[in-house]
Amino acid sequence: MGRPSGVEVVTVTETRTGTYEVVVIGGGAAGLSAALVLGRSRRRTLVIDAGEPRNAPAAHMQGYLTRDGMSPAEFLALGREEIARYGVDLVRDRAVDVTKGEGDDFAVALAGGETVHARRIVVATGLKDELPSVPGVAERFGRDVIHCPYCHGWEVRDQAFGVLATTPMSVHQALIVSQWSKDVTLFLHTVAESELTDDDLRRLAAAGVAVVPGEVSELAVEDDRLTGVRLADGSTHAREALFVAPRAVPQTGLLEKLGAELHETPFGAYPVVDPTGLTTVPGLWAVGNAMGFAEQVVNAASAGYRAGATINGELLMSDLDAAVRV
């Protein structure tokens, strides 16, 4: 018996049929971590990876013990090598549909035309970042236009920071980044001064954050580095790093197809999950940024590990109970 025909299998493992015990949709830190635990638990596991990690624009990642400073691409490549050691299959494809049949049967349709089946599903599809439509922001995102001080603050410490406001919540971002530099300017951009509360203004003043009203028209760049922020009135403010707050777009389409309950947050609608990532649909887990906005790489890997271990135990008990009934 062989693998499902027409599916490009990246890792070389023992032959499989088109039915797996677990299919992991998403090959980032969360998905690979879940697959690693499941592979080591001797579970027939498939990872479906569309190859679109959220942190692809970043040159390196921080805050992951023993992996601080590693490039995201290298991290994922090592992860793929590790899961292959334990017989986990990985396909370069996109899951376009998923349905629930009788009992334990989930069917996952791939963009390449094939369908694979599994008893359990882990959704690790992450989220998409929609950047403010200011010329220069998208081109420099992940370099000197950044969003997370815990990810990049140390590398730009003590430089002249700008914070591009898109909502009144950008005040919080400006206050947080003042821990890494005492030269911070909040550009209100599309936020009216009247939207700032008295507490906002008091805290900004206490942190030494300058507030500049007026819409930002573009970024000033020289010799492939950010040099300033230009306003619609023609004035330019010298800055070396710009913090932005992308709009997070949860990738919940597959979860919704299976009827998983969602709950609204300030950052979009995410699935209702228990501490292991189990959704309201039996047999369906969500991990990493597929279950929440704030998951960093280290958190996503931890969530994947927890889900993988839980799924293995659940499958074991389910099979034992079935044997007892027989």
Image (cartoon, rainbow, N blue to C red):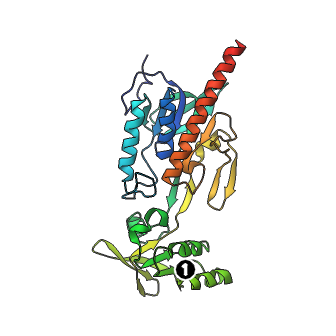
Left or right of 116? Residue 144 is left
Left or right of 153? Residue 326 is right
Q: Residue at x 42, y 45 (%)?
A: 51
Residues 300 and 165: in front is 300
Residues 16 and 172: in front is 172
Q: Position of residue 286 (x, y in %)?
A: 59, 43
Which amino acid is tagged 1?
Leu
Q: Residue at x 32, y 73 (%)?
A: 225
Q: Residue at x 51, y 61 (%)?
A: 130
The residue singled out by tag 1 in the image is: 188
The residue tagged with tag 1: helix, strand or loop? loop
Point out the image quarter for the C terminus. Answer: top right
Left or right of 88? Residue 198 is right
Give the total number of marks visible in the rendering: 1
- For the question of whether residue 251 can be seen, the reply is no
Spot the residue most to the front.
66
Q: Position of residue 296 (x, y in %)?
A: 51, 55
Q: Residue at x 68, y 34 (%)?
A: 282
Q: Position of residue 78 (x, y in %)?
A: 37, 42
Label 1 packing within 10 angstroms: few (<14), some (14-19), many (20+): many
Report which quarter residue 218 is drawn in. Answer: bottom left
Q: Position of residue 219 (x, y in %)?
A: 40, 76
Residues 42 and 100: in front is 42
Give the vertical position of 46 relative to 189 (above or below): above
- For the question of whether residue 313 can be seen, the reply is yes
Spot the residue most to the left.
223
Point out the image quarter for the N terminus. Answer: top left
Give the vertical position of 205 relative to 20 (above or below): below
Spot the residue most to the right.
325
Report which quarter residue 274 is drawn in. Answer: top right
